[in-house]
Structures are given as C-alpha cells and as structure tokens.
Image (tube, rainbow, N blue to C red):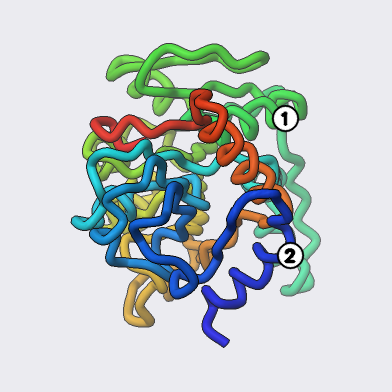
C-alpha cells in the first residue's frame, strides 16, 4: 500500500463528521469540492482542477511545498496545521537534544565505551544559555518548556513577541544579539526568502566558540558548506540535524561521515491524525458557519 493510502486509512478512522466527506480524490469531482485537506507531498499534486475551493488546509505545519506548487489556486484561503501533537512532538525532540548536549551525554558514552573514568560535571541549567530562532506555535512551546527546566532561554522572531519566562528579541539587531549569547542554538523557523541561509558564515561566527546547533526546523535555514567549515574550525562543536536541503539526505553527503554531526531522519514532529482530525473538523464547521478559519497563511510572508 502506498504511504499516502495508509495515511488516508488513519484519517478515515478519525474523521467521523456529519458532512459529505471524501478522502480519496477519485471519489468526488473537483468542481464539487469546497475544501481541500492536503499532504503537500503526497496524493493530489495537480490542483488546477480545484478552482472553486474556498479553503486549502495543509496537514503539515510548513506550507512552503504548497506555496511552491504552481497549480495552487490564488483565490482560496490557505491554512497551515497547528495541533497539540505537532507541538508536543517537536518540544520533546528539542528538549531531549538540548539536555543531551547540556549534560555532555555524548562524551559520557564515548568515555564509558573506552573504559575511561573521566569526570566532567556540567553547569546547572540556569547557567546554560539556550537560543530559539522562531517563536511560532512550535518554537514558543519548546522555549517555554526549556525555561521551566530553568535554562536561560532567549527567543528570536521577525517581529516582536512575548513568551513567559523567555527573553524575546526580534529584527536584525535582535538576531545578532541572540546568536552572540547562545551556547545551544535551536532553529525552528519556516523556510522563506528571509530565513533561507540564516545560519551562514557570518552568523555562525557570531555564536560563542564551541556552540551547539539543533535544527528540527527546515533544511534551507543552514548553509551546509558554512556549517561544515565552522565544525572543522571548532567554532561549532556539534550539529544535530533533523532536516536537510535535500531529503532523504544523499549517501554521499559529508554530514553522514562527520563525527560532529548527528543526523536524524526528519522525525522531530509528525502530524498525528488523532489530533489533526479535530482541527480539520473545526475548520469545516467554521467554513460552513461563515466564521474565520484558524492559522491562515500570509502568502507574502510564506507562513
């Protein structure tokens, strides 16, 4: 069974609603569709026949794949997915790897496997500066959780935001400020014209020497060559990467062979049908009642 067909089976079990629902494109004529609920990379790719739709709901948090689809109609409202499973999964991944690097778990494992008794007590979490680039729903949830664990957390966003327990910075000046303080840097930004390559030779050099990067956001946020150079020079001690400019990561890519890089296969967060189906049901109801939809994408910004 194709991956998208397996996904449809999961959604069928969750979407029990009193509306005319079709979860297989072959079951309904495009001109009869009011709302499209889409996986951006599976199932329907040619959206041109769906010119009459009122809304397009992505089942992913990121919508750059949909925005790059030349057949996406211009008229309907485009919505991204925000649901508790995505936020919780992303926060689990970020907190787990922040703690891993904060506590020096990799070093402990290496020394243990070598039979070495080599004490190295980490600082308290309150004395570890963590930066989070991106304070949307996912980034803000992770930043709040890190702050609850007593880390010294700062967050950065394009425009001013407020998150309890987090020092919030914004704009070009704020970006340089957060980089200069972040011993552990988490990137959870969308991929837009403004954020692609945001971690490059100049910005990586602003981080404290020996900083760690954790990127579960988007692969294009990082200039791969600049990161490899920073790892080689010791400017960056380690990079834990869940997303890449090309996926699956090609077997020939130097990230695979670099001991200072941890590769995880885009597992930080996944849309869970059990949660997301409730969002879809609510969106359908809001459309029928003529109410504003949730999480509308500003196409000019890309999120």
**Residue at the (42%, 38%) spot, across then down:** 189
CA gap between label 2 and label 1 equals 43 Å
Q: Quadrant of the C terminus?
A: top left
Which quarter of the picture shows residue 169? top left
Q: Residues within 10 Å of mark 1 (few under 14, many from 20)?
A: some
Q: Is residue 106 visible to us here?
A: yes
Q: Secondary structure at mark 1?
A: helix
Q: Name the residue beneath numbered marker 2.
A: 13
Q: Secondary structure at mark 2?
A: helix
176 to the left or right of 264: left
103 to the left or right of 280: right
Q: Residues within 10 Å of mark 2 (few under 14, many from 20)?
A: few
Q: Is residue 39 above or below residue 5?
A: above
**Residue at the (61%, 36%) spot, across then down:** 285
Query: Which label sits in the foreground, 2 or 1?
Result: 2
**Residue at the (63%, 46%) spot, across then down:** 86
Dots 2 and 1: beta carbons under 8 Å?
no
Q: Name the residue beneath numbered marker 1.
A: 125
User: As drawn, which residue projects farthest toward the bottom?
Assistant: 1
Q: Number of callouts in the render? A: 2
């Amino acid at each position: 069974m194709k991956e998208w067909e397996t996904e449809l089976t999961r959604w069928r079990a969750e979407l029990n609603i009193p509306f005319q629902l079709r979860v297989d494109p072959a079951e309904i004529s495009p001109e009869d569709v009011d709302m499209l609920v889409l996986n951006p990379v599976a199932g329907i790719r040619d959206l041109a026949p769906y010119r009459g739709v009122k809304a397009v709901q992505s089942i992913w948090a990121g919508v750059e794949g949909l925005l790059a689809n030349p057949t996406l109609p211009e008229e309907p409202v485009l919505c991204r997915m925000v649901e508790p499973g995505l936020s919780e999964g992303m926060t689990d991944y970020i907190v787990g790897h922040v703690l891993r690097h904060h506590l020096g778990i990799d070093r402990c494992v290496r020394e243990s496997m070598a039979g070495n008794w080599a004490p190295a007590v980490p600082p308290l979490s309150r004395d570890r500066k963590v930066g989070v680039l991106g304070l949307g729903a996912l980034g803000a949830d992770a930043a709040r959780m890190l702050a609850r664990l007593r880390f010294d957390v700062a967050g950065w966003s394009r425009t001013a935001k407020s998150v309890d327990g987090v020092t919030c910075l914004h704009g070009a000046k704020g970006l340089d400020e957060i980089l200069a303080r972040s011993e552990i840097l988490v990137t959870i930004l969308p991929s837009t014209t403004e954020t692609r390559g945001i971690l490059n030779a100049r910005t990586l050099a602003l981080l404290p020497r020996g900083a760690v990067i954790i990127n579960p956001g988007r692969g294009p946020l990082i200039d791969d060559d600049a990161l490899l150079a920073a790892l080689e020079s010791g400017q960056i001690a380690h990079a834990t990467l869940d997303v890449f400019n090309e996926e699956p990561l090609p077997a020939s890519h130097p990230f695979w062979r670099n001991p200072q890089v941890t590769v995880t296969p885009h597992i930080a967060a996944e849309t869970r049908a059990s949660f997301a189906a409730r969002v879809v049901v609510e969106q359908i109801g809001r459309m029928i009642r003529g109410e504003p939809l949730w999480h509308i994408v500003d196409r000019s910004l890309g999120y």
